[in-house]
């Protein structure tokens, strides 16, 4: 199941909006057992680590980190945010 994050906006930076996005994804996207959740960053212009941390925390706590996949992105802010999140204990993918 692919989740297009651009639906939450082109600039994704605040922790409260990330928390809301995580809850929205959990409420509206119901993967079947074993299905992966693929986060697609296409169309996102800027992303902050706080926003991404909230989304990943919500999804990984519900579905497990092995089922939540961040698709590759050439966007520098996405890449840097992923790098920062992956360095945190318990958040490595």
Image: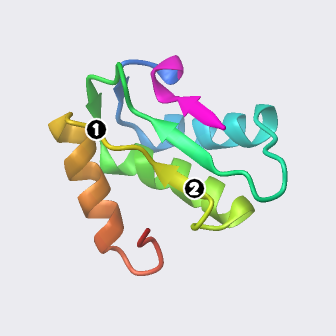
Nearer the observer, 70 or 48:
70
Q: Within 10 angstroms of label 2, few (less than 14), some, or many (20 or more) residues? A: many
Decide: is 92 above or below 68.
Answer: below
Decide: is 64 above or below 90.
Answer: above
Q: Are marks 2 and 1 in contact (CB under 8 Å)?
A: no
Image quarter of the N terminus: top right
- Residue sitting at 23 percent across and 47 percent down? 79
- Residue sitting at 51 percent across and 53 percent down? 69
- Which of the 4 image quarters holds residue 20? top right
Residue corresponding to mark 1: 73
Q: Between disc 2 and disc 1, whose residue precedes?
A: 2
Image quarter of the C terminus: bottom left
Residue 56: give x, y in percent of width and height. 53, 55
- Residue sitting at 51 percent across and 34 percent down? 17
- Residue sitting at 57 percent across and 55 percent down? 68
Q: Within 10 angstroms of label 1, few (less than 14), some, or many (20 or more) residues? A: some
> Which residue is outermost to the bottom?
89
Q: CA distance from mark 2 to mark 1?
A: 15 Å
- Which of the 4 image quarters holds residue 43? top left
Element type at mark 1: loop
What range is drawn magenta here?
1-7
Residue 81: give x, y in percent of width and height. 27, 50
> Which residue is outermost to the left?
76
Element type at mark 2: strand
Residue 89: give x, y in percent of width and height. 40, 81
Question: Magenta includes 14?
Answer: no
Residue 71: give x, y in percent of width and height. 41, 44
Nearer the observer, 88 or 70:
70
Give residue 68's mark.
2
* Left or right: 24, with 8 as reference point: right
């Amino acid at each position: 199941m692919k989740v297009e994050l651009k639906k939450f906006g082109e600039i994704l930076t605040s922790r409260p909006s990330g928390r809301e996005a995580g809850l929205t994804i959990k409420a509206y996207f119901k993967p079947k057992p074993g299905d992966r959740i693929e986060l697609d960053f296409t169309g996102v212009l800027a992303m902050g680590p706080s926003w991404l941390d909230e989304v990943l925390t919500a999804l990984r706590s519900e579905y497990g980190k092995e089922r939540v996949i961040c698709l590759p992105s050439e966007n520098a802010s996405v890449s840097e945010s992923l790098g920062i999140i992956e360095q945190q204990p318990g958040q490595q993918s």
